[in-house]
Image (tube, grey):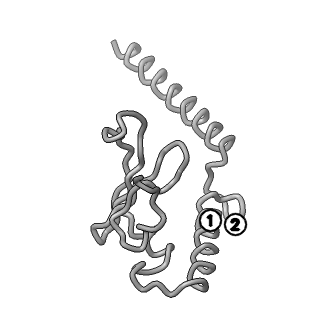
């Protein structure tokens, strides 16, 4: 009985090691890593958002936007994909912020299709 338990434990340990190696390989192949600088996708996204935020702040002084894009990205409370029941097909991604506002994006195109923010209303598609 003791030998059987040891064999089971050895099999479990082997599965964990092989699974971990496979997960590491998949993550490194897809570019998901914890490296510094340019190799870190999170740093790349933050850099792009910062560039957009700095160019946006120089273009307009809309006080109703409630802060920079970087502030809004860091204030995300939840993000979920929902079925578009109003359209009867497709899905949209709803992002909720800590101030209670939300934005809805088409999952296929990434276009903004809904928002509770007054500053976004001119960016929404026409209802006509």
Q: Quadrant of residue 63?
A: bottom left
Pointer 1: residues within 10 angstroms few (<14), some, or many (20+)?
some
* Residue that mark 2 sits on: 37
Q: Are the two marked residues, 2 and 1, in contact with CB atoms closer than 8 angstroms? A: yes
Residue 8, horizontal then vertical, whole percent: 42, 19
* Mark closest to the chain's N terminus, 2 or 1: 2
Position of 69 with respect to 55 (left or right) is left
Left or right position of 112 against 33: left
Q: Residue at x 48, y 23 (%)?
A: 10
Around disc 2, counting alpha carbons within 10 Å, would you say few (fewer than 14), some (14 to 19), or many (20 or more)? few
Location of residue 46 (image quadrant): bottom right
Q: Residue furthest front?
A: 128
**Residue 27 place in picture, x, y as percent:** 61, 42
CA distance separating discs 2 and 1: 7 Å
Q: Tell me which corner region of the image, top left, top right, bottom left or bottom right, holds residue 117.
A: bottom left
Q: Say which residue appears at 44% left-offset and 81% top-offset.
A: 67
**Under tag 1, what secondary structure?**
helix
- Tag 1 residue: 43
Above or below 110: residue 99: below
Q: Quadrant of the N terminus?
A: top left
Tag 2 secondary structure = helix
């Amino acid at each position: 009985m003791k030998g059987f338990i040891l064999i089971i434990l050895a099999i479990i340990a082997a599965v964990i090691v092989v699974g971990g190696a496979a997960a590491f390989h998949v993550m490194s192949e897809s570019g998901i890593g914890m490296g510094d600088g340019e190799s870190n996708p999170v740093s790349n996204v933050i850099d792009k958002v910062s560039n957009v935020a700095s160019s946006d702040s120089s273009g307009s002084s809309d006080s109703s936007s409630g802060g920079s894009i970087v502030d809004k990205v860091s204030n995300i409370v939840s993000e979920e994909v929902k079925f578009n029941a109003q359209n009867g097909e497709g899905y949209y991604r709803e992002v909720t912020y800590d101030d209670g506002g939300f934005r809805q994006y088409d999952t296929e195109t990434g276009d903004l299709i809904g928002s509770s923010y007054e500053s976004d209303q001119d960016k929404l598609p026409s209802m006509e």
